[in-house]
Amino acid sequence: MSTASTFLLATTTASCIALLARNRKLRTDLITARFEAHHDALTGLPNRRALLLHLDGLLADRTRPVAVALVDLNRFKEINDEHGHTAGDLVLCRVADTLRGLRLPRTMVGRMGGDEFMIIVDDGMYTARNNAEAAAQALDATTVILGATNFGCYASLGLALADHNDITAVDLIRRADAAMYAAKRRGGGVREWHENIGATVTATLPMQRRRYRF
């Protein structure tokens, strides 16, 4: 083989190796970008976008039961204000680990943002209620130790079941939100949505209502 042919072969081989390496990097970057687009950076749980996409997909089938439990941590603002965001982040990560470790049946668990988490249940109220109660009990027993301070991860949970009467993801989450505030007013635990709960909560906690933006 001539020197020119040897050089051409070596150059072509090097180019192919470089191209393969670049393709591998592009695939890795794409996988990473897709993961980051649908997962919360702090906790690694599915994020708001992923939760809404999943919920929309479930609600598209009008024959299947779907429920949502909205989880809101009690006194989280006080932890942030008194001990700083590092303590708050530790609590959020601990909550995420606790919810993820439960391996609740027929569920998707994610973080909506702030101190708000969501449990989407691809089943009826019996499973949804059991999952919500299991989550509440697990969080009540969960603590975070930072120095000499022990933080509890107590939460209020609002539970709502889709009635499939043209209900949207926004409607279902707002119902769960109203039930969650009823639970918070009671001191924590799990409350289920009913037709009159929204008016009751709005009247009693008008300044504390969350404003969701979808």
Image (tube, rainbow, N blue to C red):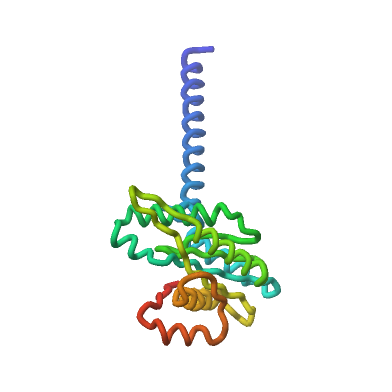
Q: Is residue 67 above or below residue 91?
A: below
- Of all residues, the one furthest to the front in this rendering is 148
Task: Please name the residue shown 52% across and 65% down the image.
Answer: 118
Q: Position of residue 213 (x, y in %)?
A: 42, 73
Residue 160, image x, y percentages = 57, 75
Asked if residue 37 can be seen in this view, the reply is no
Q: Is residue 43 above or below residue 137?
A: above
Q: Residue at the far right: name it.
A: 63
Q: Residue at x 46, y 44 (%)?
A: 29
The location of residue 66, given as percent across then percent down, is 63, 70
In front of the other: 27 or 85 = 85
Give the image location of residue 16, x and y in percent: 51, 30
Residue 135 in view: yes
Q: Nearer the viewer, residue 49 or 209?
A: 209
Q: Give the answer, above or below, for where 176 lies relative to 112.
A: below
Q: Residue at x 63, y 82 (%)?
A: 165
Number of callouts: 0
Of the pair 43 and 166, the residue shown nearer to us:
43
